[in-house]
Amino acid sequence: MKKRAGAAKPSGSIVASLLVLACVAIGVVGLVLPIIPGLIFLALAAVIAARHFPWVGARLRNHRSLGRHLNRADGFVRLSLPDKIRVAGLLCAKALLDGAACVASLLRKPGRRVRS
């Protein structure tokens, strides 16, 4: 395939805008349908928008709880690849341990009988 001389690549802000819109659309659908994790897609849209649009980033960083998470995400971006892998592994281990603790607490609830 030959490229035309006048054809330009889409700019990063256009691609980011489309990605943000797609994440927001999936997030809104996910709030209604329990199968799709809506909050994750809405948070992803906020992070992408904050990274590509300075006015959105400034507004989100002024938020009481979102600003803290965005600052942590910036710190993660600056890590080297081995450190990112280490952090991801630790987060996975923590999620597994939290899940096991949740299952154990459900099994230990008093007054819960298992029928045979």
Image (tube, grey):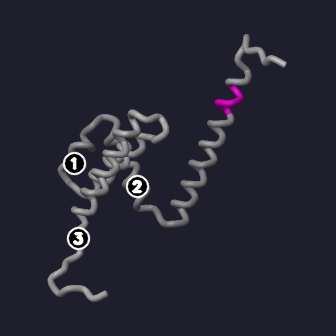
Q: Quadrant of residue 64?
A: top left
Q: Quadrant of residue 13?
A: bottom left
Task: Using the numbered discs, state the Cα–Cα distance from disc 3 to disc 1 in whole angstroms.
Answer: 21 Å
Q: Name the residue under label 3.
A: 10
| First in sequence: mark 3 vs mark 1 | 3
Write the residue at 29% across / 56% down.
51
Task: Using the numbered discs, state the Cα–Cα distance from disc 2 to disc 3 in whole angstroms.
Answer: 28 Å
Name the disc covering residue 75, or none: 2
Q: Mark 1 points at which residue?
A: 56
The type of residue carrying mark 3 is Pro
Q: Position of residue 58 (x, y in %)?
A: 21, 47
Residue range (magenta): 101-105
Q: In which quarter of the image is residue 108?
A: top right
Q: Please tell me whether mark 2 or mark 1 is closer to you in this view.
A: 1
Helix, strand or loop at disc 1? Answer: helix
Q: Residues within 10 Å of mark 2 (few under 14, many from 20)?
A: few
Write the residue at 63% across / 47% down.
93
Q: Please tell me whether mark 2 or mark 3 is closer to you in this view.
A: 3
Q: Which of 35 and 81 is in front in this view?
A: 35
Helix, strand or loop at disc 3? Answer: loop
Q: Nearer the viewer, residue 53 or 68?
A: 53
Task: Name above or below for residue 3 compared with residue 19.
Answer: below
The type of residue carrying mark 2 is Gly
Q: Main secondary structure of the magenta part?
A: helix
